[in-house]
């Protein structure tokens, strides 16, 4: 059974005569007749009742008709997908937030733009992500910043026109080992942190930059590593940690860490931002695609 036979079969069903089907298909009547006979031999059944007034479907022919349309539709879909490459969106994300925040964004894109192939590329360094957006290697990137213009947290921007969309808030928590002198349940003022050790990652880390904005130079900074390392060291009583709330929720719930509430009206937080280059669209309608990623 061949696709051309199914097309001829549909034409004969529609036009009821071999001659009219041949005209519609641009074939010789003999070719149409031979294809129908060949299809009947392949299926080992008669598909048409031949009569002077035209051809009508047998019971077997009626059963074949929906299958013929389905197979021809699938063949057309396969042809389109092979010939027409689906547009791809290369999305970068900080490793810190890739596992916790990127899946929901990818799910929203899959739901709202099923025509796209979205690939996720994780990176530990913000500068590498921004460089990828500036060069066009990435269509957009997910990173952390604070309210205000892009880069307000304190990191440098590449020389390229960038725009951003704030997707959600990322609350920060100052945590300590249970029994720490400041863990009294009351708000902690910045001056009370004098002499304390704040465990941090590299100076370019978003949480390091956030701590500098919040506490200035009132606290000693001790480099220890990423979020997981800082959390483990705080549990050992080696210092304090300013970490994203999502990373310490379980520790706070089970009591292996305690929250030190700040004496400010607004709790510390960062913003999850989607950043892209405004003058170079990686695919048509990029801005609309990225807004589809918003909650």
Image (spheres, rainbow, N blue to C red):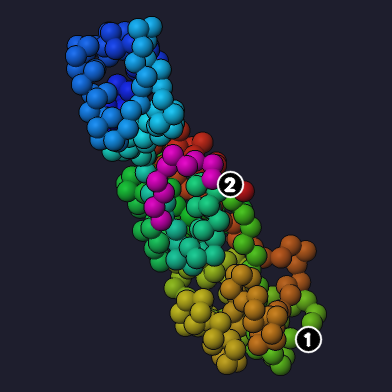
Residue marked by disc 1: 184
What residue range appears in magenta? Answer: 111-120
Residue marked by disc 2: 294
Which part of the image, by quadrant, shows the N terminus? Answer: top left
When the figure is inspected, residue 51 is found, relative to residue 267, above or below; the finding is above
Q: Position of residue 193 (x, y in %)?
A: 66, 81
Residue 53 or residue 244, whichever sits in front: 53
Residue 49 as seen in the image, left or right of residue 181: left
- Give the mark, 2 or 1, whose residue is nearer the N terminus: 1
Instruction: Give yes or no for residue 118 being in the magenta stretch.
Output: yes
Residue 98 or residue 8, whichever sits in front: 8
Q: Quadrant of residue 87?
A: top left
Q: Position of residue 166 (x, y in %)?
A: 58, 49
Q: Position of residue 83 (x, y in %)?
A: 27, 34
When the figure is inspected, residue 28 is found, relative to residue 203, above or below; the finding is above
Spatial CA distance of label 2 from label 1 is: 39 Å
């Amino acid at each position: 059974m061949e696709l051309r036979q199914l097309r001829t079969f549909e034409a004969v069903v529609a036009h009821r005569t071999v001659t009219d089907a041949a005209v519609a298909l641009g074939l010789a009547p003999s070719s149409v007749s031979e294809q129908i006979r060949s299809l009947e031999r392949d299926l080992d059944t008669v598909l048409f009742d031949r009569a002077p007034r035209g051809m009508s479907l047998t019971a077997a022919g009626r059963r074949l008709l929906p299958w013929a349309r389905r197979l021809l539709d699938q063949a057309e879909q396969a042809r389109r997908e092979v010939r027409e490459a689906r547009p791809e969106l290369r999305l970068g994300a900080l490793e810190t937030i890739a596992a916790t925040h990127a899946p929901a964004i990818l799910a929203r894109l899959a739901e709202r733009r099923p025509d796209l192939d979205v690939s996720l590329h994780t990176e530990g360094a913000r500068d590498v992500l921004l460089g990828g957006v500036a060069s066009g290697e990435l269509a957009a990137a997910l990173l952390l910043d604070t309210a205000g213009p892009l880069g307000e947290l304190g990191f440098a921007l590449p020389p390229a026109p960038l725009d951003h969309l704030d997707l959600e808030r990322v609350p920060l928590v100052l945590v300590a080992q249970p029994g720490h002198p400041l863990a009294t349940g009351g708000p902690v003022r910045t001056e009370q942190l004098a002499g304390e050790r704040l465990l941090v990652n590299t100076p370019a880390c978003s949480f390091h930059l956030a701590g500098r904005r919040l506490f200035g130079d009132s606290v000693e900074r001790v480099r220890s590593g990423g979020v997981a390392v800082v959390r483990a060291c705080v549990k050992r009583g080696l210092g304090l940690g300013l970490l994203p709330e999502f990373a310490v929720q379980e520790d706070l719930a089970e009591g292996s860490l305690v929250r030190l509430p700040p004496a400010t009206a607004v709790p510390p937080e960062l913003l999850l931002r989607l950043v892209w280059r405004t003058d170079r669209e990686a695919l048509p309608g990029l801005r609309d695609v990225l807004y589809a990623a918003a909650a």
